[in-house]
Image (spheres, grey):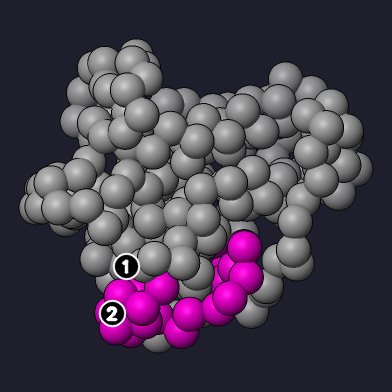
Amino acid sequence: MATSAPAASAKAPLRVQFLAYEGVESLDFVAPFDVMSMAAYLSNAVRTTLVSPDKPTTITTSKGMRVEVPHGWSPQDADVLVVPGGGFTKPGSGLHKLLSDKGFMRRLADVKAIKVGVCTGVMALSAAGFTRGRPATTHANAKAELAAQGATVINARVVDDGDLITCGGITSGLDGALWMVERFLGAQLATRIETIMEYERRGTVWRS
């Protein structure tokens, strides 16, 4: 099991892809994208890319926001893949449509990059087999199902199990992204971003 991404630097930036799909929960991907983009601006050691499951497109989020997604997903071009949620408790939601896309799920199951699940995006990682027998968290409304699928559910906002990082409810994506900055780029940069964004992380990161 991989436990770290390549050392990030301006010459070899950490390549972070954010999956955005029809019906995605807006804050699940916008918040961590903003944090990591700030890290990219301040350090030149991160490259952020918004990707769709298939090809460049324009999506409508669960709250009606229209977002242009300029790139199709290319798993080989990422060190980190961030998977947001999108209505796990609602039949026909964006997340359920993603889960029913067998081609996408097969590709997801083969991902070698570090996987980061935000909110119920963790359930996509669970469906792909990444959480079975491992510590993980997700939105409160999906924790029972996550446990039923074989994960050891941890009641923390962020759970770091090496090549699998999972975040709890919607706003926990901020905490997860700031933890990624600290883990891969150092506490000094993470603290600086907290100051600029006027946001203080909540809770303690659970680490295996």
Q: Which amino acid does label 2 sit on?
A: Gln
Circle 1 sits in a helix, a strand or a loop, which is it? helix
Q: Dot 1, crowdedness within 10 Å: few (<14), some or many (≥20)? A: many
Q: Residue at 25%, 64% (x, y): give it.
A: 128
> Residue 39 vs residue 47: left or right?
right
> Residue 171 vs residue 61: left or right?
right
Picture layout, residue 180 above or below residue 152? above
Viewer can see residue 2: no
Mark linked to residue 192: none
Q: Position of residue 78 (x, y in %)?
A: 45, 40
> Which region is colored magenta?
143-165
Q: Residue at 39%, 65% (x, y): give it.
A: 141
Q: Quadrant of residue 13?
A: top right
What residue is disc 2 on? 149
Callouts 1 and 2 close, C-beta under 8 Å: yes
Q: Total marks drawn? A: 2
What residue is disc 1 on? 126
Of 111 and 176, which appears nearest the observer? Answer: 176
Residue 145 magenta? yes
Q: Where is residue 166 in the image (x, y as percent from the top left)?
A: 51, 61
Q: Residue at 37%, 20% (x, y): give it.
A: 65
Instruction: Tell me which numbered mark, 1 or 2, is placed earlier along the sequence.
Output: 1
Picture layout, residue 99 above or below residue 129? above
Q: Position of residue 122 (x, y in %)?
A: 39, 60
Of 103 and 168, which appears nearest the observer? Answer: 168
Q: Where is residue 73 in the image (x, y as percent from the top left)?
A: 30, 33
Residue 161 magenta? yes
